[in-house]
Image (cartoon, coloured by chain):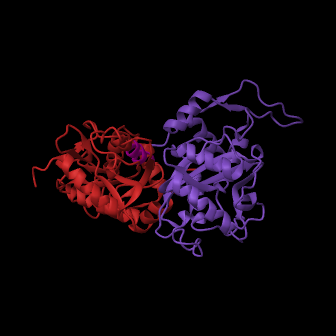
Chain colours: A red, B purple
Amino acid sequence: MENESFKNIVERKSEVEWTKSLPSISIDCVVFGFNAGALKVLLLKIKDQDLWSLPGGYVGKQEDIDAAAKRILFQRSGAQNIFLQQFGVFAELNRSEGFFAEFEDTLWHKQRFVSLGFYALVDFTDVIPVVDDVSSDIEWRDIDDIPALMMDHRKIFDEALLTLRRQLNYKPIGYNLLQEEFTMPELQRLYEIILDKKLNRGNFYRKMIAYDILDKMDEPRKAGGAHKAPNLYKFNTEKYQAALENGLKEGW
Amino acid sequence: MENESFKNIVERKSEVEWTKSLPSISIDCVVFGFNAGALKVLLLKIKDQDLWSLPGGYVGKQEDIDAAAKRILFQRSGAQNIFLQQFGVFAELNRSEGFFAEFEDTLWHKQRFVSLGFYALVDFTDVIPVVDDVSSDIEWRDIDDIPALMMDHRKIFDEALLTLRRQLNYKPIGYNLLQEEFTMPELQRLYEIILDKKLNRGNFYRKMIAYDILDKMDEPRKAGGAHKAPNLYKFNTEKYQAALENGLKEGW
């Protein structure tokens, strides 16, 4: 049924959702991908339309919401083993009515849904997205080049980006996005790309050391030429895990 | 019907909720009260039971969720004009089944609900709580003296407190909790009570100034005796508002 229209597919899915899903609650996933100095987001192009969407879906009547977010992301993008965090609630009245205007009012998708936003930050070279049946394309899009998104998905994306940036003040990032051993400038570069601004080198160093999540290696990286070999660090797995759960030291 | 049992009241309310409320979504409010060095939380004692609860309820089918949170808080506590912020989602399977075990399975309250947590921080002398019909008592309880709470309300409270503390790193607090003009030690004391720890005076001063939300008054507070008159500050309303919306300067 490769040529089945978007409308047909949605109407067919509506019947299934009415029987198996929890009413009023939906999930949308904002998956940020970082690699080699670029910050991207995973988007689906909707079949038959000039609109893109976040990977989203519904929750089973007896399904855990974290499990639902993982399942939805997998079904809609093929992406697996991604740690998704819930970050916001999108509940404006009539947020889906306009998009589904040409459908019957009994369509599942046209009911009132409060959407739970989930986000993740991954190395995008680890994820090979696969297009699903309601989409004609799936892409990692640069965050400076976001196409028109359906419904309130632009707002969900903006809020996720704000959350990611704000989170840098109380939770660490970097594990899985850098080599096991890295230099302080490499870690700083990661922060700079996510925050989209230059950081002061001295301040960054002091703050990161105060967070107490890094171990300094005995041996610096071997450097060629006349340059001083840069110090190498790695995340102290135990402290990093504690900081992910309880927040960073420092702050107030 | 002052002596109507908790069970009867809930069964009566169940019928109303089935017709007017959105399925699957509930709201719980954590209202923190600050005054004179104490941090408290607003709790209701459930009628006929040795359990307390947060003020909570359901969302109208066409009701905005922020409006619903305000209405629920007012109906259950009499508290008005409180700025509630959504902070978390509580979605564990069967979170209400145990509490409503002795009721029929068709009871509205016994269905699966994902609860949206809202929290606020107010001056508790501004709020005179009024007990509602499913409660036998309503009190401002010290956060170090929380009684047994129904369902997952302890978890909701803990998460709200963590959010309040974490928020101090990226959003300002204090407006409405202090006199219009205050000294830096008074502001520091507010932070210390919320964080439940002593802060370094110099660091606090530098960080607060870097946030750029305070105006220093020309005249210091008149002090009696030999002490130096302390400097007075007030919130710069415009900058304070911007920081509430966009976060504090500084950070990374």
Q: Which residues are magenta?
A: A159-166
Which residue is more in the foreground, B208 or A205?
B208
Q: Relative to B225, is A20 on the left or the right?
A: left
Residue farthest to the bottom, as pictured: B102
From the top left corner, tell me how far across and down residue A101 is, in percent. Answer: 30, 39
Q: Does residue B200 appear anywhere in the picture?
A: no
Q: Please tell me whether residue A138 is drawn above or below residue A16 in the rendered image.
A: above
Q: Outermost residue toward the top?
A: B218
Q: Is residue A11 left or right of residue A121?
A: left
The image position of residue A23, as x and y in percent, is 40, 57
Q: Is residue A113 left or right of residue B94?
A: left
Image-based side of B242 in relation to B145, left or right: left
The answer to whether residue A166 is seen in the rendering is yes
Q: Is residue B176 above or below residue B198?
A: above
* Majority secondary structure of magenta residues: helix
At which x and y percent is residue B31?
65, 51
Q: State the image coordinates of residue B51 (x, y, percent, origin top left).
A: 69, 69
Residue A51: within the magenta?
no
The residue drawn where x is 23% and y is 39% is A51
The residue nearer to you, when weighing B203 against B181, is B181
Against A6, residue A58 (above or below) is: below
Place residue A222 in its image quadrant: bottom left
User: In the rendered image, which quarter contains the C terminus of chain B?
Assistant: top left
Residue at image location 80% in from the left, 33% down from the top: B229
Image quadrant occupied by the N terminus of chain B: bottom right
Q: Quadrant of residue B107?
A: bottom right
Residue located 77% across and 29% down the image: B220
* Count of marks overlaid on the render: 0
Q: Is residue B55 above or below residue B81?
A: below
Compare residues B131 and B230 and report the one nearer the observer. Answer: B131
